[in-house]
Amino acid sequence: MEIKVKENCTGCGLCLKVCLYEAIKIVNKRAVINENCIFCGACVDACRFRSIAITGPETKKYDFSDYKGIGVFIEISDGHINDSSLELMIKAKELAKELKTQVYAFIAAAGVNSYFQELCDYSADRIIYAETGEGKEINEDALKELLTSMISTIKPEIFIAGATSLGRSLMPAIACSLETGLTADCTELSIDADERILLQTRPTFGGNILATIITQNCRPQMATVRPHVFKKNRIEKSGIKDLKEKGRHFLSDFSDILKNLKTKLKLDESMEDFQEKINLNDFDVIVSGGRGVGGEKNFALLKELADILGGAIGASRAAVDSEWISYPHQIGQTGKTVNPKLYIACGISGAVQHLAGMQTADRIIAINKDPDAPIFKVADLGIVGDIFEVIPALVKKIKEEKS
């Protein structure tokens, strides 16, 4: 890169005032830039006379016209399609409408044809599949080779997967094989339709900043997305029968590739994680506590409410950092993303980092002493009051109604 001062420079000194690196001096009424310059561009923006310019190598233009469609990796768990995959199918359809393209489901499983109807119900325009055979579990290394081959042949312009334990391990390996970029743990996906660029948003710096990342010079554009960030709703009704009647080629079989795949990996045994386990997404009701709960003992009050509603206890990062409750309960950008039918936020102010993990809940009730707390902006019902007064009254009323 190179920075130049043009002849129309007047030596006014505006650039001098904004430079943080002592890279500019005024000599004979003209700006002179020295080796301290880091090409931040602050002086370019400050100059009223457009006297400073940064130049660099000409940007190379790439031809990605062969890449079309949005691919979704379909993960199978215990004989069922993982919820995160179905959520991504719905999001992929939304993105595909903006790009005027199709949604491809990539799946490898035993009895794979049993999943076709559900994938069509969840917006698949084309299913890229491989039959693994009953009782023949495909290991991750072989799955990586298979999907890499599938993607290289089909050439989707975007390929996404859930940020599950498998997705987080598998997708970087595939991206490396394809020599493309990958953004992990996204909480939002959107499209720059003019440039056909996937805008991949994810938290960074401990969840304090949201960064939007693009893959400009490689294809496919790849990302993993946190489970339960998007809602899972069927949007197609006709499914396979309608696709066949329209004569559309919607199945692509890659089963033969598995016969030639070789792997050096072998699974000897699996070990359980003995840390506290709680899957908050198994509950329709979550009662969460934040800094306003005041201490570990006071979470018993929230648990009483959660128990009577058949729900679970959640928490903000502030409560977890204070060691009032363990990390598996944390909700937000640096914790879990949930979408229960009812979310009750107790003593939670509603920082953007926490909202990112729960704002897709069907109904949100917020209890907070501060009437200006940001949580009230997303709440369906806001109660301004002390949680130590409101929750006992609420528990009492629910018990009366139940009796």
Image: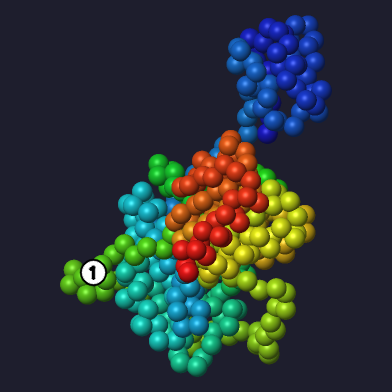
Instruction: Say which residue appears at 75% left-offset and 59% top-offset.
Output: 296
At which x and y percent is residue 218? 53, 54
Q: Name above or below for residue 8 compared with residue 248.
A: above
Instruction: Say which residue appears at 40% left-offset and 77% top-offset.
Output: 129
Q: Is residue 254 left or right of residue 357?
A: left
Type of amino acid under label 1: Ser
Q: Quadrant of the N terminus?
A: top right
Q: Nearer the viewer, residue 242 or 298?
A: 298
Q: Residues within 10 Å of mark 1 (few under 14, many from 20)?
A: few
| Count of marks, rendered view | 1
Instruction: Say which residue appears at 47% left-offset and 67% top-offset.
Output: 402
Q: Name above or below for residue 99 compared with residue 373.
A: below
The outermost residue toward the left is 245
Any part of residue 267 in sight? yes
Q: Is residue 277 left or right of residue 22?
A: left
| Disc 1: which residue | 238
Instruction: Say which residue appears at 43% left-offset and 67% top-offset.
Output: 86
At which x and y percent is residue 393? 57, 54
Q: Nearer the viewer, residue 340 or 267?
A: 340
At which x and y percent is residue 122? 35, 67
At which x and y percent is residue 283? 52, 68
Q: Name above or below for residue 330 compared with residue 22.
A: below
Q: Which colour scheme appears in the figure? A: rainbow
Dot 1 falls on a residue whose secondary structure is loop
The image quarter containing residue 184 is bottom right
Any part of residue 155 in sight? no
Q: Nearer the viewer, residue 301 or 79?
A: 301
Q: Nearer the viewer, residue 120 or 178?
A: 120
